[in-house]
Image (tube, coloured by chain):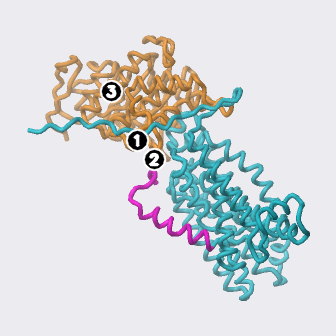
Chain colours: A orange, B cyan
Amino acid sequence: MTALDTPTTTTTDRVRLAADRVRLAYGEKVVVDDLDLQLTEGSFTAIVGPNGCGKSTLLKALGRLLRPTAGSVLLDGRAITSTPTREVAKVLGLLPQTPLAPEGLTVADLVARGRHPHQSWLRQWSSDDEAVVAEALRWTDMAELADAPVDALSGGQRQRAWISMALAQGTDLLLLDEPTTYLDLAHQVDVLELVGRLHAERGRTVVVVLHDLNLAARYAQRLVAMKDGVLVASGTPAEVITEQLLADVFELEARVVPDPVTGTPMVVPVRRLR
Amino acid sequence: MTLTAPTRAPEHRARPRRVLRVRHVSGTYRLRQLVVPLATVVVLLLAAAISMGRGDYPISIPQVLGALVGLGDDTQRFIVTELRAPRIAAAVLVGVALGMSGALIQTFARNPLASPDILGVNGGAAIGAVSVIVFAGTGTTAAGVLGGIGLPLAALLGGFVMAFAVFGLAWRKGVDGYRLVLIGVGLSAMANAVVQYLLTRSTIWDAAAANVWITGSLNGRGWDDVLPLALALAVLVPAALALGRVLNVLQFGDETARGLGVRVPLAQGTVVVVAVALAAFAVSAAGPIQFVALVVPQIAVRLTGGSRPPLIASGLLGALLLVASDLTARTVLTEAFPVGVVTAVVGAPYLLWLLVRGRRRSTL
């Protein structure tokens, strides 16, 4: 058993993270209203929807970066906003859309900061931390770049470094906000393969906001489609990605064909519906 | 057809982390982070010893050391322990306070151009101090009140009030570094206008005295000035060091920091209170000495490496810069020359270089 192993998790019906009739607003502007969502242990969920549908806002609320104006987000059955931040950080990790790394920070230092919630003022760095960080670097193929400054990395490598930090944080749940933004297709696949392995090999419960429907359908077990702050559809990729849904949610006329590689639904756009 | 070799990741010099464990206390450090502060302490002690010997009445370094432990004649002992030692102690403490304050603010704002000046500490302190100088002896109610407070306390209060006004206006469920800098620049300009107005109402002698204070000077500092500063630092320096671990994570931005279990508004508030207090005590003791808080943390981070200005090295380098600047002001120039002129001469070109340099450390 390596330092990173969390107790083996399989998909169960146990709900780890739930949105209970949440309303989310920026000031007066309500972005999400009366939304229910349940995320079970060991699941891999992708939230999809057009720009401005509130999917990133929902993810922020699930990661307690945004306090709901009504309803609540429950982590293991307990309101996340009344759970101490440090306790949450031991169970739930999150990766913002464009995380900011200070210039001069090395990959090893970045990954080491993932241990922050597990440390205290007296116990700043233990051999456990050392082992977890080394394993996280190796597991994400970043060991060779451990001493490279994060700002000198390519976009794909940088995203791997951040995922490595999230891995070192050792949380059961992981929320990622558009981790493939600004990456070319090869690196998008690379990042999602890595996230997929986190789910499959490390038993992480993953929630990811994605723009690319074909990649979402390929990697996630469950898709959640949103439009105008409302949850429109939820289910397996085959259940959610239908020609009707693409017309309703994305205002897109499209054909849905089986992906020749995985058999998951694949969207072939025809034209924008007005 | 030509094939180019696949690009390899650049080789990076390994900077091994060392782990320090004393019973249950543990932490990581790098060799440079240990060597730079130690070397600074050595140079600082040397500069302080030289500084205590130089002046209208030169005293050799062995005699200085002797006078400090009570040897030598009365004149030497008086000059060293009563005239020069408190002045140099003030320089060291003010330098430590400004260096650490700058390191805290720059890390917090994620901006190398941020400093306690930006938070309005200097502007507010100048209003307080210049008011005392200008209204003293006018026989008005203001003169009575201000005279009772005294100049250092008036400067301290002015600095605090201004800094929290800037912080309060910048607060929107947390603080954005860019917004903080803009509001700070705006309010500092207003404070400057108030000071200018006060100066136009003052006599030529008061205006001259006020200008020396505004430049920042260690002239005539005695143990009475050093004591409050020393007491303040005894509390504030440990407080600043305790914030180091949180600063490491705050650097990532609010969302990532929150994700790593930091209560961001509380952490930000604590950092600002400690940084403002450090700067305000420094200003109340020596006036708004320019550029130390701005320049020193950036020099320190370049010397030690790493991703944020180191607190201890910034404090020590601040002390060294101030002692060396004061030595220069007293010996190369004339006795009455305020130390702020020297730090400005050193600091201004550095600021220009920082501004014209293409690459910025982190985004605004």
Residue B329 is one of the magenta-drawn residues: no
Quadrant where the N terminus of chain B sits is top left
Looking at marks 1 and 3 on the same chain, the residue that comes earlier in the sequence is marked by 1
Q: Position of residue B203 (x, y in %)?
A: 73, 88
What amino acid is labelled 1 in the image? Thr
**Mark-to-mark CA distance, 1 and 2:** 15 Å
What amino acid is labelled 2 in the image? Glu
Q: Which mark is residue A103?
A: 2
SS for dot 2: loop
The quadrant where residue B282 appears: bottom right
Q: Position of residue B65 (x, y in %)?
A: 81, 60
Residue B198 in the figure: left or right of residue B118:
right
Disc 2 or disc 3, which is closer to the eye?
2
Q: Which mark is residue B343?
A: none
Q: Main secondary structure of the magenta part?
A: helix
What amino acid is labelled 3 in the image? Leu
SS for dot 3: helix
Q: Position of residue B50 (x, y in %)?
A: 72, 65
Magenta part of the chain: B341-364
